[in-house]
Amino acid sequence: MSVPEYLYARLINAGMTKEGASAVLGNVQHESAFKPENVEDRSGIPDSDYVRRVNTGQMTRDQYMYDTYGMGLAQWTYPPRKGWMWDWFKSRNKSIDDLEEQVNFLIWEMKEHYSGCWNLCCSSNSLYDCVHKLLWEWENPADKNGQFPLRLSSAQDWFNKLSGLNVGEVEIPGETTSTPVIQHPSKPADEVDDDGIPIDKTFPPRMIDSHCTGFKEIKLLEVLLWCHGYNVLVDGIWSDLLDKNLRKFQREHGLVVDAVCGDNTWRALGLNV
């Protein structure tokens, strides 16, 4: 059984229609070519080396979350999603490129955080609608309009090839090139407030503006703006460039243009707050 066949069978068995499962395949094909070890080329890091760094703890959770590099079947990129992915694989002591576990995570994430996409793919017989919703909400690449016809065409190809597949017995494809998991170092102690309570500086994200020097949310904001196609530096510094692009984002999304990133702006950027 090939990786596309495995993914398709798992999605059908989880409740998706043939059109919904084919729409997922059409998107995943253009994200990772069905390679669970795939890391975005612009990282300059070989896939096997990136996987090794994650598995051995050479890369920290924050580094993994905020490096802006897509990783895995769905090319998970946004910090919250890579954080969920990190926690999922570490809690199960699985290699970050483990195919079966990536499919488990993909299904969980869509049900838990993209329920609109999941519900549509489990009920709709429209390839067009499923590909469109997955592309705009679940994958959200920069060039959505340019990508849509390509992914719709690929989804149609997968539907034609796999709609008659017997999904009763699912076989995991042959061994991947996974790096053996080595227990990562213990997590550094959390920062605490005056009462000794751990401080989470990122989630849920606080309201921030140009006065919030040192807040981790600044880097989160920069990464999210960058993922939406805005020209910012991911350096954790509230610069004139960040201020300008935040105002531009707010203007283009019908928000109050005040360069203050509060709940409405976080939501528009894609966070559930």
Image (cartoon, rainbow, N blue to C red):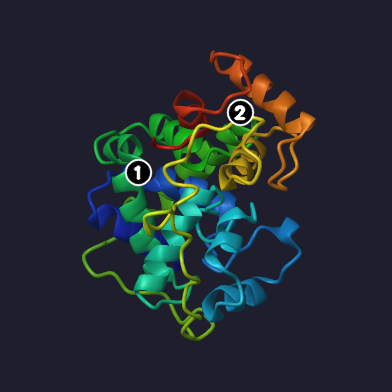
| Residue at x 42%, y 75% (from the top left corner) | 173
- Position of residue 160 relative to residue 116, above or below, is below
| Residue at x 75%, y 42% (from the top left corner) | 233
Question: In the image, residue 71 lies at what x, y percent?
Answer: 57, 59
User: In the picture, residue 123 is in which quadrant?
Assistant: top left
Label placed on residue 145: 2
For the residue marked with disc 1, what is the amino acid? His
Quadrant containing the C terminus in the rendered view: top left
Total marks shown come to 2
Identify which residue, 96 or 122, lies in the foreground. Answer: 96
- The kind of secondary structure element at disc 2 is helix
Identify which residue, 78 or 8, lies in the foreground. Answer: 78
Where does label 1 land, which residue?
A: 113
Q: In front of the other: label 1 or label 2?
A: 1
Label placed on residue 180: none
- Position of residue 75 relative to residue 39, above or below, is above
User: In the picture, residue 92 is in which quadrant?
Assistant: bottom left
* Horizontal arrangement in the rendering, residue 203 relative to residue 71 (left or right): left
Residue 1 visible to an observer of this rendering: no
Question: In the image, residue 179 lies at what x, y percent?
Answer: 54, 83
Decide: few, some or many residues near mark 2? Use Cα within 10 Å; few <14, some 14-19, many ≥20.
Answer: few
Whichever of labels 1 and 2 marks the residue nearer the N terminus, that label is 1
- The kind of secondary structure element at disc 1 is helix
Question: In the image, residue 193 lies at what x, y percent?
Answer: 43, 54
Identify which residue, 63 or 74, lies in the foreground. Answer: 63
For the residue marked with disc 2, what is the amino acid? Asn
Tell me if label 1 and label 2 are in contact, CB under 8 Å.
no
| Residue at x 58%, y 24% (from the top left corner) | 260
Real-space CA distance between mark 1 and mark 2, rounded to the nearest whole angstrom: 23 Å
